[in-house]
Amino acid sequence: MDFNFNIIIYIVVGVLVAILIYCLAVASFGYENFRENLNELNQEANQYGFTTRDFVDQLNNTKFEGKVELKLCNEGEDHFSPNYIALSHKTLSSNSLASLAIVAHEMGHAEQYKNGVKLEKHWKRKRTGRALGKLFVPLVIIGIVVSLISIFEIIDSMFVYAGLGVIGLAVMLFLFAIYNKFMEIKIEKEASDFAIKFLKEYLNDKELKKCKTFLDSARLTYWADLYRTMFAWTMLTGKTSMFK
Ligand SMILES: [Zn+2]
């Protein structure tokens, strides 16, 4: 009986350690992996040589009745905002699979925006997170200080509950940050699914597969960010911000 119980403990601990190692590996190499994929796919032109600009215009006309406005932004800052898509000169003039995949993904966000309030709700949650997030460090410090000075009876020992309550609020903020990051991954996945649907009409199977791998590697950076937030306390992960 005892023997079986020990084995179960070993298995549980082993599985937990394996999960931790996996999360730390993704947290460390997720971004690098994406950059490698990006560099590789940046070199590869699509079969017909059409530019990202042609692709966006066509997609806009056929799927969005021309309603998505196109704006210029700095290199590396391609994004979607309500009713417009911002792309850099470099992205627009490129005919690489990487640029097409990035733009198709941003148009995927446009599709989400068109289809419902999911994206707006997510942005609202993120804004709330950023505002409340400023309280995290002060709450942790106040909670620890109040708990300690009441444990050492410098103030009434009943204050320990107040201290623990404040720490509890900080923990809730932390969980809110994790939840937001998890929801972000879901939103990103859906945008990439739309992207693949869009790209399917323009690329051959081989190109499509490469774009899918690239978009998967982009999503892995969001997992990396989530794991960095979850395991920041181990001091083994790269830096991130709880609410960015
Ligand atoms: Zn996205």
Image: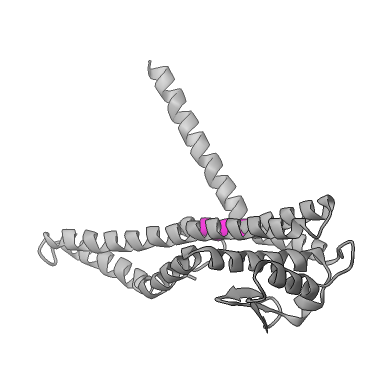
- As rendered, which of 60 and 125 lies closer to the eye? 60
Residue 32 position within the rendered picture, expressed as x and y whole percent measured from the top left: 70, 61
Q: Residue furthest right?
A: 48
Q: Residue at x 47, y 29 (%)?
A: 10
Q: Could you tell me which residue is drawn at 77 percent across and 70 percent down?
A: 55
Specify the principal SS of the magenta part: helix
Where residue 25 appears, x then y in whole percent? 61, 51
Residue 28 can be seen, yes or no: no
Question: In the figure, residue 45 lies in which quadrant?
Answer: bottom right
Q: Is residue 79 left or right of residue 121?
A: right
Rendered residue at 76%/55% (across/down): 200
**Residue 131 picture quarter:** bottom left
Total marks in image: 0
In the image, 209: left or right of 108? right
Q: In front here: 196 or 129?
A: 196
| Quarter location, residue 4 | top left
Residue 6 located left or right of residue 217: left
User: From the viewer's perspective, is residue 79 above or below residue 203?
Assistant: below
Q: Position of residue 53 (x, y in %)?
A: 78, 76
Examine the rendering and report whether any part of residue 63 can be seen. yes
Q: Give me the residue at 75% from left, 71% from top.
A: 58
* Residue 57 percent location from the top left of the image: 74, 74
The quadrant the N terminus occupies is top left
Query: Who is closer to the viewer here, 110 or 35?
Result: 110
Magenta stretch encompasses residue 209: no
Above or below, 236 relative to 133: above
Specify start and end residues of the magenta stretch as a single range.
220-227
- Residue 222 on the magenta segment: yes
